[in-house]
Amino acid sequence: MKKCFLTIVAVLFMATPFVFPRELKIAGVFSNHMVLQRETSAPIWGWADPGSKVTVTPSWDNKKYVGNAGEDGRWEVRMATPSAGGPYTVTISAGKRRSVTLQDVMIGEVWICSGQSNMELNLIGSTSQGVEGSYDAIIEAPEYSDRIRFYDIKAGKAFTPQEDLDCQWKKTDGEVAAGVSAVAYFFAKRLTRTLGVPVGIIANAWGGCLLPPWVPMDYMEKYVKGQIPEASYKNILDRRDEPDPNREAPRQVATLYNSRLYPLKGYSIRGFVWYQGCSELIFGDISYYDKLQAAMVRSWRDLWGDSDNELPFYFALIAPYGYSNPEGPGRGYFVENQLSSLDIIPNSGVAVTETLGDKGCIHPARKKEVADQFATLALENVYGVKTGLGHKFAHPDVVTFPSGSKVATGVRHQAGYDFDVRVSEDPGSSIVIHFADTRIGLGHYSDYGSPVKGFEVAGQDRVFHPVPAVTLWDSVVIDCSSVKDAVAVRYAFHNWCEADLTTSLGIPVASFRTDDWPM
């Protein structure tokens, strides 16, 4: 009888397979040492048995936040985060026997820092390419390791959207800090020192990448197609990455969006910082970068459900560099197009790099100055900190040519700002350019004016000639006596030149031109 009973049980067991509970899994962007955005409803997600109840208990309030796994096993729970602080723990459980506790969790400010090699360049630098101030920053890193945390993404390309990332948050002691993005680290250090809260950086850069890999295909179709020449659009779509996801800089549409942005969707952040463009200048068409960048920002904000453009987007202008022809004007036109992004990307701002470049190195060493400009934008615009430095970049607003000049007068809009072209009533041989948003003037004050390099003037023949110039308070006075019938001025409008105009605070003035002549 007993043998018969056991046989029946065995048959039933075989007819009804036993389902082992799925392992409780937390998405890779949540780990020990992570930073969660303060004062928000921060999501946390992962996977468990379909239909199972998931409970999340953070130690800052010890409340139980509950959700259920869907048919695909994915669950998401939102937690109310406090003002700032830590360390805390976050315990996630799905049933009595399955539980995970995340340790050393901080609450503060979280930013995504993305782009190509000038964002990727490590704090310690790379072979024969140093970073100014890196030695002090690395030596001091242990002092900030509790307050600065990095999630440094190294995922390869992907041809379909990925759900997860294999990465861990890390505290930035000296060894870790040396190997993370210099721009992002200096940015985080400035924020944590000024705000007094922890800062988490999601570092997401790939050297040499083009911009379209960061944009999903449907956004290319909706926001780029029809806005640029058809041949140029086709050229973008024809670029293909190799099947090996870790080889060569990404070229194909969406391959980085799929692997490095999509898995982060919804992670609570404060904004985006972007440093990219050199590859576009070399391989792309510099006349429509603004359209590509606007499409990218729209796709990123939509991925975070930000229809109101509340997540700021701050980007760096590409720095001077020789490229294949230092005298070439390509970078000048490209910077102009980058600046025109300000017209079509709401809640955006720029860091100017005009005097921070290096003729022989595409990765200039002065990364802290770039980071400080990003930090100033964030402090003024996002955090309401009145730095006294302002949050706008210095630019021409009135350009006055000598009497008798045949220049076309009137207000022009160019490179994201307006300037007024006038003709003086007084005779002379000087062009005077007045600048807005300098805060306390231009250059170094002296009784005779401070000479500045990088200015050129052209007559109606459209041939540009280098000319002397000096700063005078908020203006630059240009001697155009050597140019017949001067009608146009350009500043630093080359891939590389020894242009040195800054505000009196040392912030670079971006390259510009007063003409609208075709490239």
Image (spheres, rainbow, N blue to C red):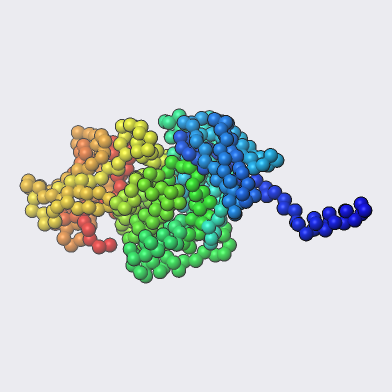
Which residue is depicted at the point 37% across and 38% down? 382
Which residue is depicted at the point 57% across and 31% down? 62
* In the displayed structure image, the side of residue 16 where residue 407 appears, left or right: left
Q: Indicate whether 231 appears above or below 374.
A: below
Quarter holding the C terminus is bottom left
Q: Position of residue 226 (x, y in %)?
A: 34, 66
Foreground residue among 232 and 447: 232
Foreground residue among 187 and 20: 20
Q: Position of residue 261 (x, y in %)?
A: 49, 52
Foreground residue among 458 and 408: 408
Q: Is residue 140 visible?
A: no
Q: Quadrant of residue 281?
A: bottom left
* In the displayed structure image, the side of residue 253 where residue 1 appears, left or right: right
Total residue callouts: 0
Q: Position of residue 376 (x, y in %)?
A: 37, 37
Q: Position of residue 449 (x, y in %)?
A: 21, 38
Residue that extends furthest to the front in the rendered view of this protein: 1
Foreground residue among 148 and 277: 148
Which residue is depicted at the point 8% across and 53% down? 404
Which residue is depicted at the point 19% across and 33% down? 447
* In the displayed structure image, the side of residue 217 where residue 22 appears, left or right: right
Q: Is residue 254 visible?
A: yes
